[in-house]
Image (spheres, coloured by chain):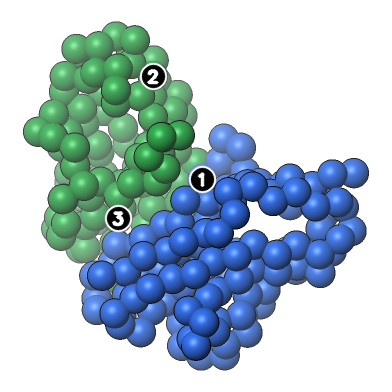
C-alpha cells in the first residue's frame, strides 16, 4: 500500500522564484494537511482540507502561500514569490476524516531559497 | 484550547536500558493522543495512539504509553532501547471537537549509546 508521496524531495531556487510542492494522498483518505518544519519553530500546521475543501488556513504565513486540491488524491502548495525565510522542510499528511484517526506523513520536501 | 509539553528536549540512554519520554497535555475536551517518531530526513511515523479505549496503549517496535487522566500525562516507554530507536519523538494531541488539527509537542531527541 503506497504511502503519502511528496515531490520533489529537494528544491533549491533563488528568491523571487515560484515554488510548487506536490502531494499525493493515500487512496481512500479524505483529509489533507500541509506542515512546515524548521529548527526555530518546530512543526507548524499551514492548512488542512476535508473532502477537497480548505477548512483552516490560519497557519498560512501570508498571501505568498497558496494551497489547492484539484482532486481527491492530489494537492499542491505554492509559494510566489519565494523568500529565504521560506526555507524549511514541508510535509503533507493525509488521514480519514475523524479526529481520532492518525495522520500519515510523506517524507517531506526540503526547500532552500537562496 | 489544547497544548502539549514534552518535558525533555534530549534523552540519552545506553543500549539495552529502559526508555522514558515524558509528555503532559491539556485539553478542554476528551483528547486523542499520539506518539510519532521521526528519523533523519524522513517524515513522521505513527508509533501508537490513545483514543479513549484502554489506557495502556501498545505500539510498534516495543513502545507503549499509558494515559493518565489524573496526571494529564501520556509518557512513552520501552523496556530495552535499541540503537535503531535513536530519533526525534513527538507527542501529539487532538481534541474531540471535530477540529482535525494536531497540536505537536516540541519533540524529544533520543540518543542511544552503545
Q: Quadrant of the N terminus of chain B?
A: bottom left
How packed mark 3 is, by other alpha carbons closer than 10 Å (few <14, some 14-19, many 20 or more), is many
Q: Which chain is green?
A: A
| Residue on which disc 3 sits | A32
At x 45% / y 38%, what residue is drawn?
Answer: A108
Q: CA distance from mark 2 to mark 1?
A: 18 Å
The quarter of the picture where residue A20 lies is top left
Q: How many numbered marks, from 0 up?
A: 3
SS at mark 2 in the image = strand
Query: Which residue reaches farthest left?
Result: A63
| Residue B106, position as x, y percentages in the image | 47, 51
The reply to whether residue B27 is visible in this rendering is yes
Residue A18 x %, y %: 20, 19
Instruction: Determine which residue is flagged by label 1.
Output: B43
Q: Chain of mark 1?
A: B
Of residue B35 and residue B68, the one placed in the foreground of this image is: B68
Q: Is residue A2 left or right of residue B18?
A: left
- The quadrant where residue B77 appears: bottom right
> From the viewer's perspective, is the residue at label 2 or at label 3 nearer?
2
Residue B84 seen in the figure: no
Q: Is residue A30 above or below residue B58?
A: above
Above or below — where is A43 with respect to A54?
Answer: above
Q: In the image shown, does A27 or B43 lie closer to the viewer?
A: B43
Label 3 residue SS: strand
Q: Residues within 10 Å of mark 1 (few under 14, many from 20)?
A: many
Query: Measuring 17% from the left and 33% from the top, which residue is drawn there?
Result: A65
Q: Which chain wears blue?
A: B
Which numbered marker is on residue A112? 2
Q: Residue at x 52, y 59 (%)?
A: B6
On the same chain, marks 2 and 1? The answer is no
Asked if labels 1 and 2 touch by Cβ distance under 8 angstroms, the answer is: no
Amino acid at each position: 500500500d503506497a504511502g503519502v508521496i511528496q515531490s520533489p524531495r529537494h528544491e533549491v531556487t533563488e528568491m523571487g522564484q515560484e515554488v510548487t510542492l506536490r502531494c499525493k494522498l493515500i487512496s481512500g483518505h479524505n483529509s489533507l494537511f500541509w506542515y512546515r518544519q524548521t529548527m526555530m519553530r518546530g512543526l507548524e500546521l499551514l492548512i488542512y482540507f476535508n473532502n477537497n475543501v480548505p477548512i483552516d488556513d490560519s497557519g498560512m504565513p501570508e498571501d505568498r502561500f497558496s494551497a489547492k486540491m484539484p482532486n481527491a488524491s492530489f494537492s499542491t502548495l505554492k509559494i510566489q514569490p519565494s523568500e529565504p525565510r521560506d526555507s524549511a522542510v514541508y510535509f503533507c499528511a493525509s488521514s480519514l476524516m475523524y479526529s481520532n484517526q492518525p495522520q500519515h506523513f510523506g517524507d517531506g520536501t526540503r526547500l532552500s531559497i537562496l | 484550547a489544547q497544548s502539549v509539553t514534552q518535558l525533555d528536549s534530549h534523552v540519552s540512554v545506553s543500549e539495552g536500558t529502559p526508555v522514558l519520554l515524558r509528555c503532559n497535555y491539556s485539553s478542554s475536551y476528551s483528547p486523542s493522543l499520539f506518539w510519532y517518531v521521526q528519523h533523519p530526513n524522513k517524515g513522521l511515523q505513527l508509533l501508537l495512539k490513545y483514543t479513549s479505549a484502554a489506557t495502556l496503549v501498545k505500539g510498534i517496535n516495543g513502545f507503549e504509553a499509558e494515559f493518565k487522566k489524573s496526571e494529564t500525562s501520556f509518557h512513552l516507554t520501552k523496556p530495552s532501547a535499541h540503537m535503531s530507536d535513536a530519533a526525534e519523538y513527538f507527542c501529539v494531541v487532538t481534541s474531540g471537537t471535530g477540529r482535525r488539527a494536531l497540536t505537536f509537542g516540541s519533540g524529544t531527541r533520543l540518543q542511544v549509546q552503545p
